[in-house]
């Protein structure tokens, strides 16, 4: 009881990382509950539940796959990213890339590997190590640039992301306290991987309710 499989994803369709592949993964797991990095309250429920999502240009891989799955299966759907969302500071990452060529190359490599190998790569240890390296480089480069406004933007965004990750894990625990299920999936962007895994360990130590977390390959987290 309370088994949750985490599937890390890229939000955009990129060759092997696409909504059909994700749909097939979810279909094979056959979950009772689907948790998603999404807040349906930001949009009209009707837009997503009645198929109108299909005509949205910027729909994420996860939402498209999950909504298609919900059309064919009666399972609980729980959007868990309910933290007040702000737009990512794109200029911040552009400045980091322009300042350090190696950083840009590593980000491109992660994209290329995701493009070629899809979900098996995105959910691999290799991807985790690369994302961790990218995260550390971002912080180092921001402080190397030594611009107060840039440092503030970076730290503000880091705080928002950290709070969102807490919100998502907390919402999963709160749902689980009030609902019994055997098997669930939690679909979330790969950029959250390191932080989410750390918070799972944190909640495991402080929460009485025992949730069994598994990775994409079925290994216990």
Image (cartoon, rainbow, N blue to C red):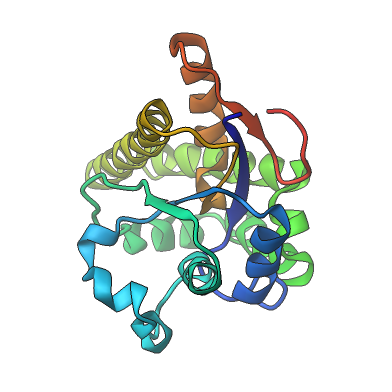
Asked if one can make out residue 109 in the rendered structure from this viewpoint, the answer is no
Q: Quadrant of residue 151?
A: top left
| Horizontal and vertical percent position of residue 79 | 37, 52
- Where does residue 50 sit, x and y in percent of width and height? 34, 80
| Residue at (35% x, 63% y) in the render | 90
Residue 123 visible somewhere in the drawing: yes
- Residue 158 occupies quadrant: top left
Q: Quadrant of the C terminus?
A: top right
The location of residue 203, given as percent across then percent down, is 47, 19
| Up-down relation of residue 26 to residue 195 (above or below) | below
Residue furthest to the bottom in view is 55
State the residue at coordinates (77%, 34%).
219
In the picture provided, is 211 more to the left or to the right than 112?
left
Choose between 133 and 81: the one closer to the eye: 81
In the rendered image, residue 163, in percent from the top left (x then y), is placed at 31, 35
Residue 1 appears left or right of 97: right
**Residue sitting at x 57%, y 51%:** 190
Residue at the spot 58% in from the left edge and 46% down from the top edge: 134
Is residue 153 or residue 197 the one in the foreground? 197
């Amino acid at each position: 009881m309370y088994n949750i499989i985490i599937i890390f994803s890229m939000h955009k369709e990129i060759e092997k990382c696409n909504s059909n592949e994700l749909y097939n993964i979810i279909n094979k797991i056959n979950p009772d509950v689907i948790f998603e990095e999404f807040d349906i309250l930001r949009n009209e429920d009707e837009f997503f539940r009645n198929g109108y999502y299909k005509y949205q240009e910027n729909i994420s891989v996860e939402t498209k796959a999950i909504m298609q799955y919900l059309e064919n299966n009666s399972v609980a759907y729980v959007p868990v990213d309910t933290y007040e969302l702000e737009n990512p500071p794109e200029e911040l990452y552009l400045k980091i890339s322009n300042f350090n060529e190696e950083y840009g190359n590593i980000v491109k490599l992660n994209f290329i590997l995701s493009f070629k190998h899809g979900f098996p790569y995105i959910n691999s240890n290799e991807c985790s190590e690369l994302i961790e390296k990218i995260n550390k480089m971002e912080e180092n480069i921001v402080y190397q640039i030594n611009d107060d406004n840039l440092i503030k933007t970076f730290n503000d965004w880091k705080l928002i992301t950290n709070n969102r990750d807490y919100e998502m894990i907390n919402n999963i625990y709160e749902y689980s306290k009030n609902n019994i299920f055997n098997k669930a999936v939690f679909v979330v962007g790969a950029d959250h991987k390191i932080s989410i895994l750390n918070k799972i360990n944190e909640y495991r130590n402080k929460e009485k309710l025992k949730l069994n977390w598994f990775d994409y390959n079925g290994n216990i987290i």
